Amino acid sequence: SMGWCGEDSVVLHWKNLGVLMVGPYGDWLRFSYGNDSAVIGHGGGEDGLKRKNPSNETEVYLVPEIDCCRIVTPTSVEILQRVPPGTADLLRIGSIEPGALLLDASDAFDSGSPNADEAARSITQQEGLLEEAIQGCIT
């Protein structure tokens, strides 16, 4: 089965492969849902209803939403969503975005690191950088 995940990602489910999320530039992530997952997707089957599962395979339903895709199994409901670019910039390893620098300074302060003061000063030395860092963290 196949469905949209937000505006620019597609989620696919194949038997024996699992769930695959493909982004707009061909990047992909694979998620396993049992070894022999039955393909039962949104609108699956001739009548759009649940198919019978005679071999005890894990049933996986893909439910496309406006900004995500719900993955429903007999034991769980999960939401699969693309990480917004602002969040990716903030949490990417080695990021030098102002919000990432502020987050690093906060983490250093919380852990009692002597580098906390230096990290905070690097943000406050340039005019407007602190405001940009705060905006990057809250949006």
Image (cartoon, helix red, strand yellow):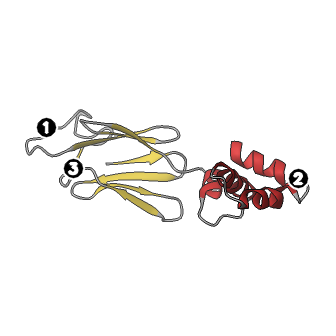
What is the C-alpha distance between the residues marked 2 and 1? 60 Å
Q: Is residue 118 left or right of residue 22?
A: right
Q: Which residue lies furthest to the right in this view?
A: 127
Residue drawn at x 91%, y 55% as measured from the top left? 127
Dot 2 and dot 3 residues touching (CB under 8 Å): no
Observer-side mark, 1 or 3, equals 3
The amino acid marked with disc number 2 is Gly
Q: Is residue 139 visible?
A: no
User: The residue tagged with tag 2: helix, strand or loop?
Assistant: loop
The number of callouts visible is: 3
User: The residue tagged with tag 3: helix, strand or loop?
Assistant: loop
Q: Which of 137 and 71 is in front in this view?
A: 137
Q: Residue 52 carries which label?
A: 1
Q: Which residue lies furthest to the left in this view?
A: 54
Dot 1 and dot 3 residues touching (CB under 8 Å): no
Dot 2 and dot 1 residues touching (CB under 8 Å): no
User: The residue tagged with tag 1: helix, strand or loop?
Assistant: loop
Taking 89 as reference, is 72 above or below it?
above
First in sequence, mark 2 or 1: give its number.
Answer: 1
Q: Residue 128 carries which label?
A: 2
In percent of width and height, residue 67 lies at: 53, 40
Other residues around mark 2 within 10 Å, as few (<14) / some (14–19) / many (≥20)? few
First in sequence, mark 2 or 3: give its number.
Answer: 3
Observer-side mark, 2 or 3, equals 2
Q: Can residue 69 be seen in this view?
A: yes
